[in-house]
Amino acid sequence: MSKFMPITTLDALSVLDNNEVLDGYFDGFHNEPEPGDNRSLSYWHGWRNGMVDGGHREIDGAQDELARVYAAAERSK
């Protein structure tokens, strides 16, 4: 289990390191094990999303909430 709390707001999303998110995403997509404390929140966030997109986990409430607020912000532009 991770020490991190899932990202659910645009403010929290905006400070993540995009390169680390991408690295984590690809590892999650390929079903790599959950990262330990040697990885950042950015990596872990990407890994969680990669796990879902790769079909290894179901989307959870935090991911669903972030998608909802992101879509709402895009519609209001």
Image: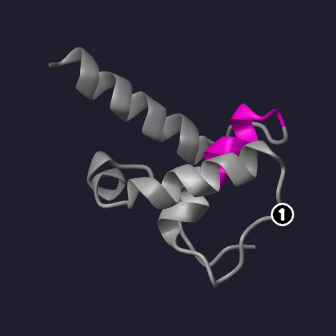
Kind of residue at badge 1: Pro
Relative to 72, residue 57 above or below: below
Of all residues, the one furthest to the left in this rendering is 77
User: Is residue 17 rendered to the left or right of residue 64?
Assistant: left
Q: Name the residue: 59% across, 56% down.
A: 23
Tell me the crowding category of disc 1: few under 14, some 14 to 19, or many 20 or more residues within 10 angstroms, Cα based: few
The magenta-colored residue range is: 47-55
**What residue do we see at 36% from left, 23% from top?**
71
| Image location (x, y in percent) of residue 7 | 46, 55
User: What colour scheme governs how the chains and residues are painted in the rendered image of this protein?
Assistant: one colour
Q: How far from the left and from the top, in percent, is residue 34?
A: 77, 65
Q: Is residue 55 above or below residue 18?
A: above
How far from the left and from the top, in percent, is residue 9? 35, 49
- Left/right placement of residue 74 relative to residue 44 reads left
Identify the image quadrant of the C terminus.
Answer: top left
Q: Quadrant of residue 50?
A: top right
Label 1's element?
loop
31, above or below 16, in the image: above
As rendered, which of 76 and 50 lies closer to the eye? Answer: 50
In the rendered image, which quarter is residue 76 located in? top left
Q: Which residue is mark 1?
A: 33
Q: Relative to 58, is 75 on the left or the right?
A: left
Foreground residue among 59 and 19: 19
Q: Which corner quadrant holds the N terminus? A: bottom right
